[in-house]
Amino acid sequence: MKAKKLFGILLAGAMALSAVAGLAACGGDDEPPATDNGLKYYVVGGNASNSTASYLYTVSNWKTEHIPELEMVKEEGTQKYSIELDLIAGDEFKIVNDAPGTGFWDNEMGFGKLATGKNDKDEDVFKETGQYGGNIGLQQGFDGRYKFTLENNSITWQLLQKFEMVTVTYKDGDTVLGTQDVKKGETLAEADLLAAPEKLFMTFEGWMNGTTAYTGGTVNEAFTLTAKYTEEANESYTADETEYYLVGTGEGTLKESGWNVGDGETPVPEALFLTKDTAYTQHNVFTIEATLYAGDQFKIAHDNSWDGAFNYTNLLEADGVPSPFEGSDNLVVKTGHDGVYRITLVTDEGEEGIYYELLEEKESLIVDYYLAGTYATAEGAEVQFRAEPGDWTIHLTEGENDEWTCEVTITENDYIPSGWDDNKDGSVHAAALKVKINGSYYGVDNTAENPSGTTGDGNMLLAAGTYKITFNAETKVISWTLVTAEPAE
């Protein structure tokens, strides 16, 4: 399906951005060697916004290799090296050399070697940029052609020509897809227009400037291009007016759910409902944007029931891209795939399925390992499963070899009620416990005797006593040993 390609493109673009940030931060703090005959000096750089209008982005993009077009020229009879560069706002770079026996970034020279970042009007033309600093970055409003000269480990600069940049904005309806900076008076060729995103059941027809198809031309002022799509025909279309919503548990958007499928008394929060995409008139497409973290899990339900819920078996994978989800019933977010996702549900007959698209990567949450389970404050009191940590919670402590451990004491007051027949250990009543990690529970399906590696539905049933519980964070295997059969007084 078309959405599969889109996710791969987006994910590849998210990975490329991370690599650029890493390279921009590379390099040591050692004093670079003095310039000397026999060495070649050249520029490496990119653009903070990955703008295709940036010469540094299109030619270098922080590649760790000698690019001839960016080699500095040695002025005859001097120890000076110079280069002329077209720069736009957001461009950033460093100068490196090929001194033998050194690493690529060992002799880098950046903002700290720039003789001055101001012009004769006392304006800051350049600033220090990069994830950890050190890059020479061009400020807004100073786009132009510059000459940089390296002599005695000092970098000087001269503005040769200032040019004006014009911004072309790309939109799909009201959504901004991206922007493109073009030098005023230059030609924007059709081949250089941004690629339009592929969309489910849609065919891209081209870019529109107002009501006119745009195929390129001279750019003298800012303008907006709008993507034109034609919906694929669907002769068997029947409008689906069902209300669909996420049901699950987690630390992001799903925190509002708590597995609430809706029972008439406790309504499903509005933030969990999918919205029908009105851009489609011949297909049933529902979407929601959700923040998901590792261990979060969900289904898509409707009509206050689990019947007919969409789950992991309905997930449509993206070709050639590692899936962010795992599971057999619930969709469970894998470790390292935290982010904001667009979840799309299609309910057309014969086309039913769940699509996903990564919109933004998120930093992983601090993982909290703890026990959750049944408890009773007095005989006959309501017994329930604690879903969130609290004062009563027993946290696991990290040890060696990715193992987390704790000790827990069970009394008869902690037993589950006799009505829970499926949680009896033979004829012995017991407490029901699991290890919980950022929304995922691990129980009997993850025991040393049954190391399935999947999130289990079964509880650990423990009779009165003190137990040592061990969870291996790498293998997802849980085990427990009885320390003493009698609970502490």
Image (tube, helix red, strand yellow):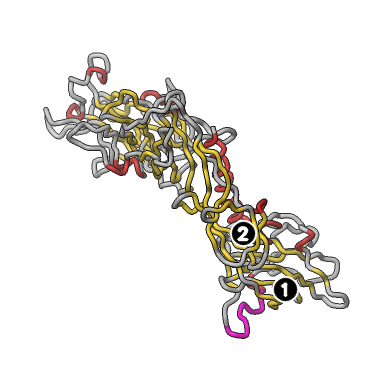
Q: Badge 1 is on which residue?
A: 148
Residue nearest the observer in this picture, 379 or 2? 2
Q: Is residue 142 above or below residue 362?
A: below
- Residue type beneath disc 1: Phe
How crowded pointer 1 is (Cα within 10 Å; few <14, some 14-19, many 20+) is rated as: some
Residue 96: image location, x then y, percent: 73, 64
How crowded pointer 2 is (Cα within 10 Å; few <14, some 14-19, many 20+) is rated as: many
Residue nearest the observer in this picture, 488 or 106? 106
Q: Is residue 267 above or below residue 132?
A: above
The structure residue drawn at horizontal position 51% and vertical position 38%, both measured from the top left corner, is: 202
Q: Is mark 2 on a helix, strand or loop?
A: helix
- Residue type beneath disc 2: Ala
Looking at this rendering, what residue extends furthest in the front direction?
211
Residue nearest the observer in this picture, 266 or 464? 266
Start-end of magenta stretch:
114-122
Q: Badge 2 is on which residue?
A: 24
- The quadrant of the picture occupied by the C terminus is top left
Q: In this view, does 33 lie above or below 331?
A: below
